[in-house]
């Protein structure tokens, strides 16, 4: 498993914990919004800044999707 994928999984788990969403719904939000690919593509910058920054950074991508799930 790549370190990028491990960080993506960590982000999904943290988002799920903070927002009380299911794993399935959270995964779907990340996939549909493009957040998964964004995290994978920008891993070097995002993991250095930390999980709080990463979740804040992708929040705008996720909120429109969150209402649909």
Image (cartoon, grey):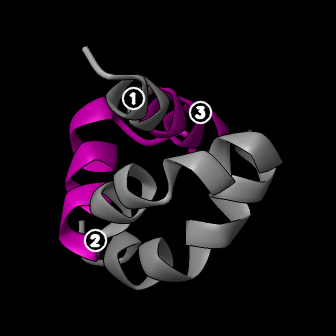
Which residue appears at 66% of the width and 70% of the height? 57
Q: Is residue 20 magenta?
A: yes
Give the quarter of the image for residue 61: bottom left
Classify mark 3: helix, strand or loop: helix
Question: Badge 3, how many Cα within 10 Å: few under 14, some, many 20+?
Answer: some
Q: Name the residue under label 1.
A: 9
Q: Is residue 34 magenta?
A: no
- Residue range highlighted in magenta: 10-33
> Residue 55: x and y, percent?
65, 56
Q: Which one is nearer the viewer's eye here, 20 or 55?
A: 55
15 sits to left or right of 48: left
Q: Which of marks 1 and 3 is in front?
A: 1
Q: Mark 3 points at which residue?
A: 14
* Residue 18 seen in this snapshot: yes
Question: Badge 2, how many Cα within 10 Å: few under 14, some, many 20+?
Answer: some
Vertical order, 6 against 42 (above or below): above
Vertical order, 33 against 17 (above or below): below
């Amino acid at each position: 498993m790549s370190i990028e994928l491990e960080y993506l999984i960590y982000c999904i788990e943290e988002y799920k914990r903070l927002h009380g969403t299911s794993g399935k719904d959270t995964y779907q939000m990340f996939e549909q919004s493009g957040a998964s690919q964004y995290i994978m593509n920008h891993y070097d910058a995002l993991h250095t800044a930390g999980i709080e920054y990463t979740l804040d950074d992708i929040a705008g991508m996720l909120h429109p999707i969150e209402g649909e799930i």
